[in-house]
Amino acid sequence: MIVLAVLGVLLLAAAVWFLRGVYYIRKARALEAEIAVLEGRTAAIEAAGEAEDEAARAAAVVALGFVAEADLDTDHMAPVPPERAAVLEAVRAGDWQAAAAYVEAAGQDWQERMERVRPLAEAAAEDDFWLLAWRTARPEDPTAALVHADAGVQVAWDVRGAKGARHTTQEQFRLFHELLVKAQADAHEAQRLASPADPTPYMVEQPIAFGLGYSHEQYRGLWEEITRRAPRVLWAHYSALQYWCRKWRGSHELALGFARTSAAAGRPGELLSLLPLVAYFEQQTYEDDLAVDTYFKEPEILAAVDAALLDLAAAGHDHPQAPMLRHMLAFLLFWQDRDAEAVEQFRYIDGYIGAMPWSYAGKPKQRYLYARDFAVALVTPGL
């Protein structure tokens, strides 16, 4: 009996201990749940506070004369020249003669010739009835052939889309390849018709080389055709740099080597100093372990930015390609904590953000506003 009594007491004690354990476990779980709720509320309050601060900062920046988010143009890197806008309106109404005169007016300024051909090619990629009329009226016109070839390139890349390979279907790739092969034939026809001094039909072939995977030897042959005619056209060098990037047919080392060689060969004001900046940006974008707030502060990148600022000063404020460099400078100067210099560039480019580096982000406005508004706030007393 005594044994049974002792056993009962022990069992009762164990039950009490177990129940107390259950109680404390439940209490702990309830406390954990409470803490989680409180942390969630705190995070929400902090996020709301940050959102309010961000909205207040954005409003203050706009009050200083900067463009509001809703009014940012993500299609263009600078205002469309009135003459270009008028020509595009004319061709959409069927006036191909306006297009012909517009491109021919560029003369042997090969950069400007491509600057005029590309928007016409983009318009033809949407509706080419006016271009077909032009080619019918002047079947041997080298300018019409050039626009036709570039339009074919635009159609091919539109079919492929801008997403990475894993987000592109096999059908897209098949059509992309077929269209590029056709565009390649059109580019070769434009080369046949062109003046012997004209590099632009060979420049049109550059993006075809990316998509069709030209070998390094084959691409160097194309590059020789371009540079033999015009050795320092920014359009051509920028396109070539893309070929040598790791994301296409090269590597970080090849891209940076090409960019440095091009920049070194450029004359003051030709803006080839843009190329190393693009090479550094492409590498940082590609490599996940390169932190944006430290990588761009490396001495060689600081020096490249300084060289680009001198090049820009030599080019002058009204240089037609200056916006392309200013966008990259604004981004890099911000991440180098050179906020006053960044704001100077933001004042020039503000309102038009259809350019690298903003266009490389899924939300270009967000990337742009983050840099612009912070830089402006840091250099504006009381903001």
Image: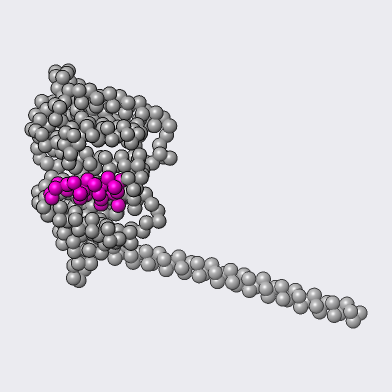
Residue visible at 19% across and 54% down? 308
Q: Using the image, determine if residue 7 lies above or below residue 195.
A: below
Residue visible at 16% across and 19% down? 140
Magenta stretch secondary structure, dominant: helix
Q: How is the image coloured?
A: one colour
Residue 372 lies, in percent from the top left, at: 23, 58
Frontmost residue, 203 versus 68:
203
Residue visible at 20% across and 23% down? 192
Q: Is residue 16 visible?
A: yes
| Residue numbers of the magenta segment | 255-281
Number of labelled discs? 0
Quarter occupied by the C terminus = bottom left
Q: Using the image, determine if residue 356 lies above or below residue 64.
A: above
Whether residue 279 is in magenta: the answer is yes
Q: Is residue 117 visible?
A: no
Frontmost residue, 379 versus 18:
379
Whether residue 291 is in magenta: the answer is no
Quarter occupied by the N terminus = bottom right
Residue visible at 12% across and 54% down? 313
| Horizontal arrangement in the rendering, residue 103 relative to residue 243 (left or right) | left
Q: Using the image, determine if residue 63 lies above or below residue 236.
A: below
Residue 173 lies, in percent from the top left, at: 39, 32
Residue 37 lies, in percent from the top left, at: 48, 67
Q: Residue furthest right?
A: 1
Frontmost residue, 169 versus 93:
169
Frontmost residue, 13 versus 172:
172
Residue 180 lies, in percent from the top left, at: 32, 28
Q: Quadrant of residue 321?
A: top left
